[in-house]
């Protein structure tokens, strides 16, 4: 029987690449999104991956969304990839409280919401793969991103704690911390700024979405069953 996979923020950028990789590897895959219905429907038409809209920062919204996914796929998620995230950048002395709350809610609270809803069924089945997408800036910090860096760093502590709770139940919980990756988001960065970013990466280039997706695919599979509570940096040597 095919295993099921759910990717939050799974219709574009890194999340879209992860959804595609899981789908092509034979998983019954569902992709979550919140805004951008036209883009999500286009993604679904191109890939054949069903898409579902809900706000990952809201527990009740997640509950309804998860129920819909379970009904569509015929069972609960065996693999959960928490990828959804936003940025609201500003220096702390200028950051609005609403921008702090939005980033923490979307990037960190969402991981609790989704894992809390997925973990009971995984424990019952004695199988699960949870992969949380953090960031290089959750490891090293970044100017103007105290909200984003705090959320992505919080994901790492959450990952390790849940890994300890879940290891005896056949569930692995790991985190992937990408550096700068070539996506629509990074494509919008000014050319001079992007050149400076590239110069800070020893590998001399941005990462590719497929490279992140391949790592997630490995962590979702059976060959990673003895790996849990780990943080995988994939940043071209930008931060060691």
Image (cartoon, rainbow, N blue to C red):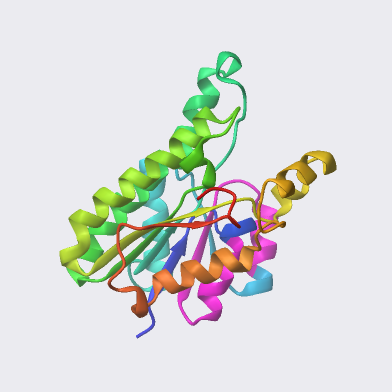
**Residue 12 seen in the current view:** no
- The outermost residue toward the bottom is 1
Snapshot quadrant of residue 121: bottom left
| Residue at the image position 36 percent from the left and 79 percent from the top | 223
Whether 92 is drawn above or below 184: the answer is above
Looking at the picture, tell me which residue is in the foreground, 95 or 160. Answer: 160
Taking the magenta stretch, the answer to whether it contains residue 17 is yes
Taking the magenta stretch, the answer to whether it contains residue 195 is no
The percent coordinates of residue 44 (x first, y second) are: 63, 67
Looking at the picture, tell me which residue is in the foreground, 171 or 42. Answer: 171
Which corner quadrant holds the N terminus? bottom left
Whether 28 is drawn above or below 30: the answer is below
Residue 225 in the figure: left or right of residue 192: left
* Image label count: 0
Looking at the picture, tell me which residue is in the foreground, 23 or 208. Answer: 208
Q: Give the range drawn in magenta.
A: 16-44
- The outermost residue toward the right is 191
| Residue at the image position 73 percent from the left and 47 percent from the top | 199
The percent coordinates of residue 185 (x first, y second) are: 70, 47
- The outermost residue toward the top is 93
Whether 187 is drawn above or below 17: the answer is above
The percent coordinates of residue 14 (x first, y second) are: 60, 58
**Residue 16 seen in the current view:** yes
The percent coordinates of residue 196 (x first, y second) are: 76, 42
Residue 161 in the figure: left or right of residue 39: left
Residue 165 in the figure: left or right of residue 21: left
């Amino acid at each position: 029987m095919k295993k099921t996979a759910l990717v939050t923020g799974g219709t574009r950028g890194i999340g879209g690449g992860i959804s595609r990789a899981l789908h092509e590897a034979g998983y019954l895959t569902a992709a979550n999104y919140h805004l951008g219905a036209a883009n999500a429907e286009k993604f679904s038409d191109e890939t054949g991956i069903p898409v579902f809209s809900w706000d990952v920062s809201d527990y009740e919204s997640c509950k309804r969304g998860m129920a819909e996914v379970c009904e569509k796929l015929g069972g609960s998620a065996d693999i959960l990839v928490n990828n959804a995230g936003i940025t609201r950048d500003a220096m702390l002395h200028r950051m609005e409280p609403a921008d702090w709350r939005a980033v923490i809610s979307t990037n960190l609270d969402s991981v609790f919401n989704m894992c809390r809803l997925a973990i009971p069924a995984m424990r019952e089945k004695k199988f699960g793969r949870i992969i949380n997408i953090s960031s290089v800036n959750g490891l090293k910090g970044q100017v103007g991103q105290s909200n984003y860096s705090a959320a992505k760093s919080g994901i790492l502590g959450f990952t390790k704690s849940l890994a300890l709770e879940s290891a005896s139940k056949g569930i692995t919980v790991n985190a992937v911390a990408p550096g700068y990756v070539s996506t629509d988001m990074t494509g919008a960065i000014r050319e001079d700024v992007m050149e400076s970013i590239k110069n800070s990466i020893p590998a001399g280039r941005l990462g590719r979405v497929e490279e992140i997706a391949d790592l997630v695919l490995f962590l979702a599979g059976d060959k990673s069953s003895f790996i849990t509570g780990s943080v995988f940096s994939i940043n071209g040597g930008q931060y060691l």
